[in-house]
Image: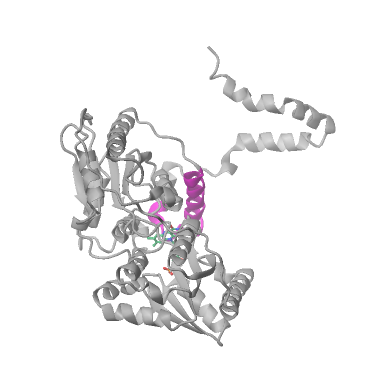
Amino acid sequence: MKIAVLNGSPKGATSVTMQYVRYLQKEFPQHELNILDVSSRVGKIEKDEGVFQEITAEVQSSDGVLWAFPLYYMLVHSGYKRFIELIRERDATDAFRDKHAALLATSIHFFDHTAINYMHGICDDLDMRYVGSFSADMYDLLKDEERSALHLFATEFFDSIERGTRPQKTYAPVARREFDYTPGRVEEKVDPGGKKILVVTDSEDGQTNLIRMVERFRSSFVGDIEVVNLCDVDIKGPCLGCIQCGYDNHCVYEGKDGYIDFYNTKVKTADIVVWAGTIRDRYLSSRWKLFLDRSFFNGHVPSLTGKQMGFIISGPLSQIQNLRQMLEGYVELQHANLGGFVTDEFGDSVEIDDSLQDLARRLTRFADTGYARPHTFLAVGGAMLFRDAIWGRLRFPFRADFVAYRRSGAFDFPQKNLKSRVQNGLMLLLSRSPQFRKEVNRRMKDEMVKPLRKFLED
Ligand SMILES: Cc1cc2nc3c(=O)[nH]c(=O)nc-3n(C[C@H](O)[C@H](O)[C@H](O)COP(=O)(O)O)c2cc1C
């Protein structure tokens, strides 16, 4: 059986993910697993149509496709994202249709589910026969039970191809509506009161709704605000995954392009940051993804602390809750506050005008009052995962993160709480007595609300 393995790592063959593929090649010598580097060669693939066609021809002549990729910022690497965009742009969807597909991801399990959801959606959009996913921790291959799980996963994949299974789809196609937004006049402008506002967009010619929404938002304010188009930011290349920045936050691109300067002088210094983009497939554009991946020079430390953030999105965001979750999780993990989303997917131009105006008002008000809504599971869980990783196995090479976490008190392991340890020890001991448990059961509800009562007294 011939399988096309689409390599999503910017590191080519020297990639953690590819070691998992090499393992499968060793375990299943009866099958041919052909690795096609996609992310690391995306520049060439984009420029040279012949290289792109070689890849799609290989997919076409294969019995199945293994999408093998590392996690990059809750999704796939920007190069992989670009390749996925090219499949539609270059009308190459036929090569993928009806092929059995499986996903093999490596990561530290931070938002791996959103990347898997995205890629699953892409397989469904391409009318592939999606068999399943295997999301491994980057060092799972060291464990006997994980190696045998991987073996079983691959066996199931090959069997499904042999049996010609037709799995049901999980994701309905994303429906876009044809609608021309026509902005109206701004009746009452918002005074930003000295707050620095930055809108980052990636709008291209023809994306009229996005361009008009950004312009309408811009004119909601008294005075001008800064709008930067990512297409004008000098970004020489994608994140290489070299993690040389881990030591002291210095990126290998330093002095070679304008990205770091842009991030440090424009993004980090703004009080209010609004991101604007058009939905491409089931995410924003690969240009946006490039922007995000390159921000990795900040490590796992929030770089937008205290900012108010909003999103202006052209496209059916409500149909892609996975994307919404990634954006919400991102804002929370950056310790920014989410002011809201505005899209052009519902309603008429007047409603969009009102929503943009309200976003301007809310962001300014929240910036004035310093409002930050509480974190949800997305950041609470994510921060704990990072805390444990930076304390433990990732302390080296992420030395800069370790220093920053120690300074900010992020290593707030619960076992340091002596009072609760003593209290719990005592209660566990006492709870051996049936009378004590009876008494606890009687008073439980009351005791739970007791500490809150002092804030309710007049
Ligand atoms: C820029 C960057 C972003 C990353 N983002 C994530 C992430 O969102 N979630 C996660 O679990 N791991 C993330 N990782 C870790 C990688 O996914 C992980 O190390 C992977 O095994 C690397 O595979 P590769 O060597 O095949 O590229 C990220 C790594 C880098 C360098």
> Left or right of 236: which side holds 332?
right
Residue drawn 47% across and 58% down?
A: 172
> Left or right of 92: which side holds 203?
left
Of 170 and 374, which appears nearest the observer?
A: 170
Where, by quadrant of the figure, is residue 24 drawn? bottom right
Locate residue 357, reporting x and y percent: 27, 34
Compared to 70, does 209 lie above or below?
above
Q: Residue extending furthest top?
A: 458
Compared to 343, does 135 lie above or below?
below
Q: Residue extending furthest left?
A: 223
Compared to 17, does 196 lie above or below?
above
Q: Residue extending furthest bottom?
A: 30
Magenta-drawn stretch, dominant element (helix, strand or loop) = helix
Q: Residue extending furthest right?
A: 434
Q: Is residue 432 magenta?
A: no
Quadrant for ligand 1 reads bottom left
Decide if residue 265 is in sight here: no
Of 58 and 256, which appears nearest the observer?
A: 58
Q: How many marks?
A: 0
Locate residue 178, reporting x and y percent: 31, 52
Of 324 and 134, which appears nearest the observer?
A: 324
Locate residue 306, reporting x and y percent: 35, 38
Locate residue 167, reporting x and y percent: 56, 68
Decide if residue 166 is in sight here: yes
Of 396 and 215, which appears nearest the observer?
A: 215
Q: Is residue 386 magenta?
A: yes
Residue drawn 23% across and 34% down?
A: 195
Which region shows up in magenta?
Answer: 377-401
> Left or right of 228: which side holds 112?
right
Residue drawn 42% across and 47% down?
A: 318
